[in-house]
Image: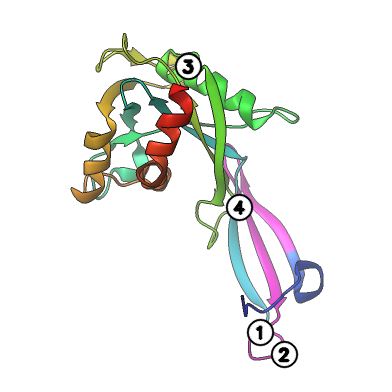
């Protein structure tokens, strides 16, 4: 039984002021607010910067016959200071317009970034990527595809969006081994592979049938 305190956004958070400090591809709002305390009472007014981003999706592409996954690799400026900026990732993208379903975005991104059409798509989970400073919500899917004719090293992406994406096909065993080799540095891929490690036998059985 959970003993979590039942706070309510409408009653227990008071936004005193909110203003937009920056708006381009990313928006940054500055909030001054108070919130209810676990010990009782209310906090003093605190200031927080909030990065506003559209919803994001990711697709772990899986072939149940080969028991293999497709990962992509591309340059990421956020990884530049500390680790290799060419990051292994799952296919991912942002919702571009209002009313566009997450499934539609997922299918589009798989085509653009991996050159594939999925035969099946299932929602896995949804989570906040960095709730300490951003509202970005990420929904993870797993998608079925035939990877038998896909070669590691094939290139995809939209040049007009600055995309230069390399495809990597590997067995599930090899992909999961990366979790223990300190080779992965982005949360969606880590979460996707950890989920696959727990569920791939069931997934393989269901999708082979």
The Cα atoms of the two marked residues, 2 and 4, are separated by 26 Å
Q: Relative to residue 69, is residue 33 depicted above or below?
A: below
The Cα atoms of the two marked residues, 1 and 2, are separated by 6 Å
Q: Is residue 147 magenta?
A: no
Q: Earlier in the sequence, mark 2 or mark 3?
A: 2
Q: How is the image coloured?
A: rainbow
The residue carrying mark 3 is: 112
Label 2 packing within 10 angstroms: few (<14), some (14-19), many (20+) = few
Q: Position of residue 12 (x, y in %)?
A: 76, 75
Q: Which mark is residue 37?
A: 1
Q: Position of residue 108 (x, y in %)?
A: 56, 19
Pointers 1 and 2 in contact (CB under 8 A)? yes
The Cα atoms of the two marked residues, 2 and 3, are separated by 51 Å
Label 4 packing within 10 angstroms: few (<14), some (14-19), many (20+) = some
Q: Is residue 20 magenta?
A: yes
Q: Earlier in the sequence, mark 4 or mark 1?
A: 1
Q: Which stretch is magenta? A: 18-43
Q: Position of residue 196 (x, y in %)?
A: 39, 41
The Cα atoms of the two marked residues, 4 and 1, are separated by 22 Å
Q: Relative to residue 42, is residue 70 depicted above or below?
A: above
The residue lying at 32 percent from left, 31 percent from top is 75
The Cα atoms of the two marked residues, 4 and 3, are separated by 26 Å
The residue carrying mark 4 is: 135
Residue 63: quadrant of the picture: top left
Q: Earlier in the sequence, mark 1 or mark 3?
A: 1
The residue carrying mark 2 is: 41
Find numbered disc 4 in the image and state the secondary structure of the residue it sits on: loop
The residue lying at 50 percent from left, 51 percent from top is 129
């Amino acid at each position: 039984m959970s003993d979590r305190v039942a706070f309510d956004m409408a009653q227990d958070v008071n936004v005193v002021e909110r203003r937009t400090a920056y708006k381009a591809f990313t928006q940054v709002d500055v909030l001054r607010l108070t919130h209810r305390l676990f010990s009782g009472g209310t906090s003093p007014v605190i200031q927080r910067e909030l990065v506003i981003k559209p919803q994001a999706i990711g697709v772990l592409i899986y072939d149940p016959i080969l028991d293999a996954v497709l990962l992509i690799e591309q340059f990421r400026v956020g990884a530049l200071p500390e680790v290799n900026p060419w990051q292994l990732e799952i296919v991912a993208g942002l919702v571009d317009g209002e009313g566009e379903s997450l499934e539609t975005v997922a299918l589009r991104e798989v085509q653009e970034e991996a050159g594939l059409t999925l035969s099946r798509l299932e929602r896995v989970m949804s989570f906040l990527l960095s709730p300490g400073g951003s509202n970005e919500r990420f929904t993870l899917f797993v998608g079925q595809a035939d990877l038998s004719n896909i070669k590691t090293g094939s290139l995809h992406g939209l040049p007009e969006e600055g995309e230069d994406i390399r495809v990597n096909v590997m067995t599930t065993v090899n992909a999961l081994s990366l979790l223990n080799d300190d080779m992965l540095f982005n949360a969606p891929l880590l979460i996707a592979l950890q989920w696959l490690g727990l569920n791939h036998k069931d997934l393989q059985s269901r999708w082979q049938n």
